[in-house]
Image: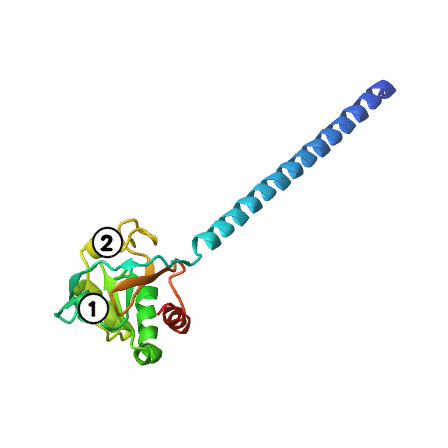
């Protein structure tokens, strides 16, 4: 029995549908690529924005407005009581930081202790944290810090305007306040990066006295 040849019109129609399918797939591919490029561009902009914000927020800030430094009396990790007035006649550098659990904060004090320039300049560094002695002492032991820490309930940190300068609204960040021999605040610096080279810090302090 003879077979009936496939009509040419049917073959043409099949080829046309095939071409249409290929064109549609190409169009979908181009669309996916456009979407991918757009998404990549948006993600890149977001990343750049986050990096820029991170760099901006990590910038050190300082102020030179002078005024009588708020008086305070605090207990220390050594069991003593220390008052700002005890240091009248010589400059004092207050170091407000996050305290227990902040390794960078404690490491900062350990490195300050290693720099003899502070003692030679007659500058006493007083670290102040919002912790109990039991909370902060393990950190001091871990990093070998010998300087007694002053234990604040928040009142002194608030008086010096250092709360919320770091990652926690109810804690200090990583800041220093320089008080001269007359009890006048000469400078305040905040370091959101959680670090300043002790040599740079010393130079900064000496330049303000």
How busy is the neighbourhood of tag 1: few (under 14 within 10 Å), some, or many (20 plus)? some
Q: Is residue 35 visible?
A: yes
First in residue order: circle 2 vs circle 1: 1
Could you say which quadrant of the image residue 138 lies in? bottom left
How busy is the neighbourhood of tag 2: few (under 14 within 10 Å), some, or many (20 plus)? few
Vertical comparison of 207 with 129: above or below: below
Q: Is residue 102 visible?
A: no
- The image position of residue 27, as x and y in percent, is 71, 31
Disc on res. 115: none
Measure the alpha-carbon separation of dots 2 and 1.
25 Å
Given this view, does label 2 or label 1 mark the residue nearer the observer?
2
From the viewer's perspective, is 117 left or right of 135? Answer: right
For label 1, the residue is: 137
Rendered residue at 25%/60% (across/down): 69
Q: Nearer the viewer, residue 195 or 101?
A: 195
- Secondary structure of the residue carrying numbered label 1: helix
For label 2, the residue is: 159
Vertical comparison of 190 with 44: above or below: below
- Secondary structure of the residue carrying numbered label 2: helix
C-beta proximity under 8 Å, tags 2 and 1: no
Q: Which quadrant does the N terminus fall into?
A: top right
Could you say which quadrant of the image residue 71 lies in? bottom left
């Amino acid at each position: 029995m003879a077979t009936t040849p496939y009509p040419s019109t049917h073959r043409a129609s099949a080829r046309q549908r095939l071409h249409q399918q290929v064109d549609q797939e190409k169009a979908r591919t181009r669309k996916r690529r456009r979407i991918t490029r757009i998404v990549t561009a948006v993600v890149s902009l977001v990343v750049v924005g986050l990096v820029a914000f991170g760099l901006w927020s990590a910038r050190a800030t300082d102020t030179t407005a002078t005024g009588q430094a708020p008086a305070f009396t605090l207990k220390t990790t050594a069991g003593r009581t220390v008052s700002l007035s005890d240091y009248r006649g010589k400059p004092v550098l207050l170091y407000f930081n996050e305290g227990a659990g902040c390794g960078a904060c404690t490491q900062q004090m350990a490195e300050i202790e290693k720099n003899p320039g502070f003692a030679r300049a007659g500058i006493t560094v007083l670290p102040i944290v919002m912790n109990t002695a039991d909370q902060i002492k393990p950190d001091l032991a871990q990093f070998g810090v010998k300087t007694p820490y002053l234990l604040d309930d928040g009142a002194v940190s608030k008086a010096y305007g250092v709360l919320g300068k770091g990652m926690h609204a109810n804690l200090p960040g990583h800041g220093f306040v320089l008080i001269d021999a007359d009890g006048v605040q000469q400078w305040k610096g905040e370091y959101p990066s959680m670090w300043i080279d002790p040599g740079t810090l010393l130079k900064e302090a000496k330049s303000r006295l």
